[in-house]
Image (spheres, grey):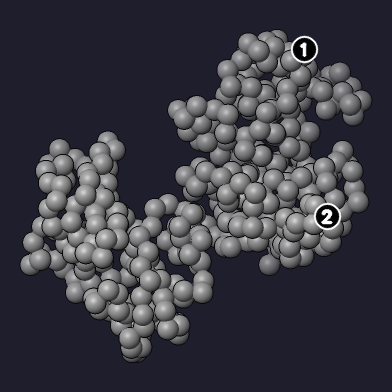
Amino acid sequence: MTQPLLSLRNIQKTYNGIDVLRGFYLEIQQGEFLTLLGPSGCGKTTVLRLIGGFEGSDGGEIVMDGVRINDLPPHERTVNTVFQSYALFPHMDVFENVAFGLRMKKLGEAQIQSAVAEALEMVQLGAHERKRPSQLSGGQQQRVAIARAVVNKPRILLLDESLSALDYKLRKQMQIELKTLQRRLGITFLFVTHDQEEALSMSDRIVVMHEGRIEQVGTPKEIYEEPKTLFVANFIGEANTFTCNLIEQRQGEVLLGYEGRTFCVKTTKTPSARLTLLIRPEDLRVERRLEDVKSPNYFEAVLEQVIYKGTTIDLLLRLDNAREIMASEFYNEDSDALLYQEGERLYLYWVDGWEVLLDEAE
């Protein structure tokens, strides 16, 4: 197995007596787009600041290319950061903003001209090199900040909530541009966000964090479809969760009890006495008649509300125990989803294997 580009080993970080990171381990591979995802205060930005050298850890090691870098100052690390505010110099034009780091290294003018021109071409801003930041759009300013970072050819580019200041449409556009740029450059990107959709659409791997710990590391597909903990399941996308009692364990399956109903779920692991059954809204199938239900695992519910979202329809339903659940269907002109009547009793089932089963302790 190849050596990781960067490793964080047993990192500890405390602020005012509060552990922000504790026993934190993470390996980052060369050329990947890795995202740190989690709620505010979970330690994401602290990880970036430790890697960038802006803060020191209270324990553990940061190793790049096999060399411990804990004591290296920021300017001696082959790492660059794109901050949320972009931190562009307002009195300098685009060219000089990008050239700033190279001038600090005292490179020759011809080398600076060539490197800056190449960086601006990468971010498609060559025609704007003499404009000031105030003359650029938010997306253009972000690209200047990226060009200023990549012109120094860092091994890792750190991006701290760098899309959060953009409006929705521009943010979606920049997600595509940023991923395309990362592939073109071949530089490792470490991206911080609290936006789950952003993480799913851009990342090679996602690190889900909670209270200074890593809850799960995996591909977007693994994180969404195979959450390892209830926190991950609830944080990534919508989830219907049901706390069930284990009735019986058989060969390759379990019988679960929930509010008087019995469900049979396939599993190969040894479960605890109480489990959480998780079903994504889009994995529920809705029928008006019980005879159309294609599984013994189903719920009866009363429709509370139909929410039209353009490409999808969300159905908010209430079980007999007053528990609300959500089902989602794709909408097209032939769909009768909008014809459902509030107060109507419906039947919901899911395809075997589309559920996730978690021990309650997880």
**In the rendered image, is residue 121 in sight?**
no
**Secondary structure type for disc 2:** loop
Among numbered discs 1 and 2, the one appearing first in the sequence: 2
Q: Nearer the viewer, residue 165 or 184?
A: 165
Q: Is residue 79 left or right of residue 73?
A: left
Q: Is residue 69 left or right of residue 137?
A: right
**Secondary structure type for disc 1:** loop
Residue 138 point in image, percent of width and height: 58, 22
- What's the residue at 51%, 71% (across, down)? 362
As drawn, the label of residue 316 is none
Residue 355 point in image, percent of width and height: 35, 67
Tell me the mark number nearer the camera, choosing from 1 and 2.
2
- What's the residue at 64%, 22% (across, down)? 141
- What's the residue at 19%, 60% (across, down)? 301
Eyeballing the image, is 76 above or below 62? above
Residue 7 point in image, percent of width and height: 75, 59
Query: Badge 1: few (under 14), some or many (20 or more) residues near its Cα, within 10 Å?
Result: few
Residue 26 point in image, percent of width and height: 69, 60
Q: Quadrant of the N terminus?
A: bottom right
> Residue 245's image quarter?
bottom left
Amino acid type at image mark 2: Ser
Marks counted in the figure total 2
Q: Is residue 289 left or right of residue 254?
A: left
Amino acid type at image mark 1: His
As drawn, the label of residue 91 is 1
Eyeballing the image, is 126 above or below 179? above
Residue under label 2: 57
